Image: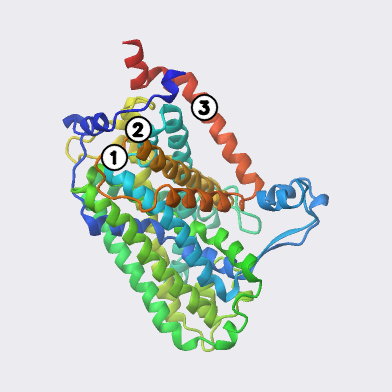
Amino acid sequence: MNQLFRCKSIDGLIAASEDPSKRLRKTLGPWSLTALGIGAVIGSGIFTVTGTAAAGKTLAENLHNNHWAWLKVTLFDFVANGFHVPDKIGRPGAGPALAVSMLLVAIACCFAALCYAELASMIPIAGSAYTYSYAILGEIFAWIIGWDLILEYAVSNMSVAVGFSAYIQDLFSGLFHIQLPDKWAYPAFPAAGDPGGTFNIPALLITLGVTWILVRGVRESAKVNTTMVLIKIAAILIFCIGAAHAIKLSNMHHFAPNGFPGILAGASIIFFSYIGFDSVSTAAEECRRPQRDLPFGIIASLIICTVLYVAVSLVLTGIRHYTLLGTSKPVADALGALNPPMNKLRTIVTAGALMGMFSSLLVYQYGQARIWFAMSRDRLLPGMFSVVHKRFRTPHISTWIAGFVVGIPAGIWDIDTFAELSNIGTLFAFVLVSVGVIVLRKKQPERQRGFRVPLVPFTPILSIACCVLLMIGLPLETWMRFFVWLILGLVVYFVYSKRRSDLADRATG
C-alpha cells in the first residue's frame, strides 16, 4: 500500500531526464510550442462537429422499445429523470449562439490551461499529466492517468485518421476524378449508412507517414507541423473573409433559439474541438526554456484557437440557417449551398481541413509516444518503449508501435462512435492536474514556480467543477467503456507493472 501512494521526487525526475542514454534533444522554442498546441487543437472538430452543435441532435425512437438505446442517455439526463431512462432523448442546438458556446468551453479550458502551465513550468518532464500525478499524488494515480492518456491519444488519432481518409478521397475524386475501390477505401466495420470495404488503406498510410516524420526528429516534425498550422490558419481566415459577404442577418435573427440549455448542449458537443492544448506539456523535455516557454505555448495556443473558432462560428451560422448545418461537413456544405455556390472556396476549406487533421495526427502521435516513453522510463511499461534512437534522439520504437496501434484499427473500424471516449479521458486528466496544483501548493509551497496560477485554490476548483459538469453531459455508454478500460488497466498494473516499477525496486532494495 505504501508503494501505491509513494511519489517520485521532482528533483529526481529532472535529474533522471538528463541521463545521456535517454536524453531527448532540446530544440523547441515558444512559437514552436504554440504551433504544436494549435496543430493539436484545430483538427477535424472545427470542420465537423460545429454543425451538430448548432443544429442539435435528436433521437426519434422510443428508448423503451430499443434494448440498447438507453446507453445514449447522458448521465445528466439519467440523474435529472430520477435515475430512470427518459422516453426520448435529444440535444437542443445552440443556433447562432454557437459562438457563445465556443467562449464557454474556452473559459472552462482556460482554468485547466493555467493549472497545466504551473505544473509544466515546475516539472518539465515528458509525460504531461502522468508525470505530474507521479510527482504529486502517487504511483497508482500516475498509472491510472497514464493508462487513461493512452486511450485518449489512441482513440483521437484513430478518429482523425478515418476522417482524413474520407476528406482526401473526396478531394481527389473532385479534382482528379480518382476513386479508390470501396474494398480499399472503407473499413470492414463501417458506421451505419456508410459503404463497407475490407481495409481503409489511406487511413493506415497517413498514420505511417506521420510516424516516419516523427522518428526523423522533433525539429523536423515541428517544422512540418508549423507549415501545416500556417496553411490551415490561412484556410480558416480565407473562409471567414471570403464568405463574410454572404452573411444574412435573417439567419441570426433567433440568436439563441433554445436558450441557455442549447448553449450548454452545444458546448458539450464542441469540447472535442478544444482537445489538444495539453499536448504542449508532453514536449517539456525537448523545450529549450521550459519554465518560460511552456506556459506561453499552452496559453497562447488556446487564445489563438478561441479567436478563430468564434470567427468560424459567426460566419457559418450567418451564411446558412443553423437548422441545416447538422451534417458531417457543415462548412463545405454551407459553401456549396450558397447561390451561386462558392466551389473554389469550398476546395480551399477542404484543403485546410486536411492540413488540420494532418497536424492533429502529428501532434497526437508525438504526444502518445512521449507518454509511453515516460511510463517505460519509470519501468511501468517494457523497456523498449524508452529506447532512444542514437542519431535522431527520438523514442523510435514507441513511435513506430504507436503508428501501427493507431493505423491498423483505423483501417478496420469506423472509430467515430468512440470520439466521446477521448472527451472523458481528457476531462479526467484535467481534473487530476487541477487537484495536483492544490496539493503541491500545500506540500511544497516554497518550490520555485516559473508560472503561478492566480487565486489558488479557487481557480483549480473552478477547473474541476467545469470538467465534472462537462463529464456528466456525456452518454452512459462512454462512462461504461471508460470504466472497463480503467479496470483493465488496474489488472495490468497489479499483475505486471507494480512489481517492475522503480519504486518497487527501491522498496525491496
Compute the Cα span from label 2 to label 3. Answer: 19 Å
Which one is in front, 440 or 348?
440
Residue highlighted by disc 1: 123
Which one is in front, 455 or 65?
455
Residue highlighted by disc 2: 135
Measured along the vertical axis of the image, is residue 149 above or below residue 57? above
Q: Marks 2 and 1: CB-CB under 8 Å? A: yes
Position of residue 364 measured from the top left corner of the image (x, y, whole percent) = 38, 49
Q: Is residue 364 visible?
A: yes
Of the numbered discs 2 and 3, the one sitting upstream in the chain is 2
| Three-letter code, disc 2 | Ala
| Three-letter code, disc 1 | Ile
Looking at the rendered image, the disc whose residue lies closer to the viewer, 2 or 3, is: 2
Q: Which residue appears at 23% of the width and 45% of the height?
A: 286
Which one is in front, 267 or 64?
267
Element assignment for label 1: loop
Q: Residue furthest right?
A: 65
Position of residue 346 measured from the top left corner of the image (x, y, whole percent) = 45, 76
Q: Marks 2 and 3: CB-CB under 8 Å? A: no
Looking at the rendered image, the disc whose residue lies closer to the viewer, 1 or 3, is: 1
Colour setup of the view? rainbow
Of the numbered discs 2 and 1, the one sitting upstream in the chain is 1
Residue highlighted by disc 3: 490
Compute the Cα span from label 2 to label 1. Answer: 9 Å
